[in-house]
Image: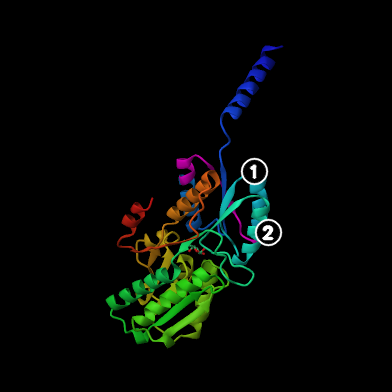
Amino acid sequence: MSKKILGAVIALLVTTATALAAPAKVKIGFLVKQPEEPWFQSEWKGAEKAAASYGFDVVKLGVTDGEKTLAAIDNLTAQGAKGFIICTPDVRLGPAIVAKSKGANLKVIAVDDQFLSANGKPMTAVPYLGMSASKIGAAAGEGIAGELKARGWVPAEVGVCVITFDQLDTIRQRTDGAVGALTAAGVPANRVLRTAQKTQDVPGSFDAATILFTQHPEIKRWLICGGNDTAVLGAVRASEQRGFAAADVIGVGINGTDCIDELRKSKPTGFFGTIRVSALGEGFTTSERMFKWVTAGTMPALDTRTTGIFMTRANLEQVLKDDQ
Ligand code: FCA
């Protein structure tokens, strides 16, 4: 045997022995509907943190539609994963996701967007972790109302631009919560103007807000709320496009991940603040629960709701430092 071949044989034996000695790491998938969004990237970071501390592998996959979701489950099965966490691109995919996962012996935890069954009711048997949507929405509304008072505006003279996305329960509850807080603070119901975004992103809300601003040229000052940061950011961009000054707009988002550059701009914009929720914590907790479920059989909590804190330019850096 030549030295070269002998060397190769030894190398092969060593690798094989190592592979046999080290038990394969548990693999857990983390599937998200909008992989380009900072919110979901932060969830992934949290998942990786859990993976590092518990010693498992996390497989991060973007699932922007139903087809990609089902393909991702096949991919996880082929890789020998034990389970996955998912923020589904469409909550009505719930039954299909559950059926496919059962067939492949994969455990599932839903994060952010709760699955809906065929009759439109939440699938409460699937462990879920998401925002306390109504409360967080109300906190956004209260944040706007506080600033309205600070600026000395007359509540009956403003318009409220509500960027809605009612097909997603967690978003509908947030926008309803915000509207409830604003009307409780004295804004008349007839000044609350809803406009639906077709897509859950900045262009989607930019278009929705532009329609509203065009329909109401009489309104000179706008309050802006929506289901997340991108909803409010798009509307703020639309207000600038229509010629509104930052001083005449108060927008408060939700997430606190997609607006960091905005809040760090040297001059304030109409995006006044956000309700910051820990995406990192959500990614960590759901991954940790999945790991304990697949390794120790510990069933995760079925329904967990997270809370948030009001973050503005004033406390931004501190809040971010506290959530790393
Ligand atoms: C939904 C939204 C995200 C985030 C998440 C918690 O999925 O689309 O932006 O707010 O809930």
Residue interval drawn in magenta: 50-67
Reading the chain from its start, which is encountered first: label 1 or label 2? 2
Distance CA(mark 1)–CA(mark 2): 18 Å
Q: Is residue 235 left or right of residue 268?
A: right
Which class describes the residues within 10 Å of circle 2: few (<14), some (14-19), or many (20+)? few
Q: Give the position of the N terminus as an image quadrant.
A: top right
Q: Is label 2 in a helix, a strand or a loop?
A: helix
Q: Residue at x 57, y 33 (%)?
A: 23
The residue labelled by disc 1 is: 79
Residue type at numbered disc 1:
Gln
Q: Is mark 2 within 8 Å of ligand 1?
A: no
Which class describes the residues within 10 Å of circle 1: few (<14), some (14-19), or many (20+)? few
Q: Residue at x 39, y 73 (%)?
A: 138
Q: Residue at x 64, y 61 (%)?
A: 65
**Which mark, residue 67?**
2
Location of residue 269 by image quarter:
bottom left
**Residue 262 at x, y = what percent?**
41, 62
As for residue 54 lying within the magenta part, the answer is: yes
Camera-nearest residue between 249 and 32: 32
Q: Is residue 99 left or right of residue 25?
A: right
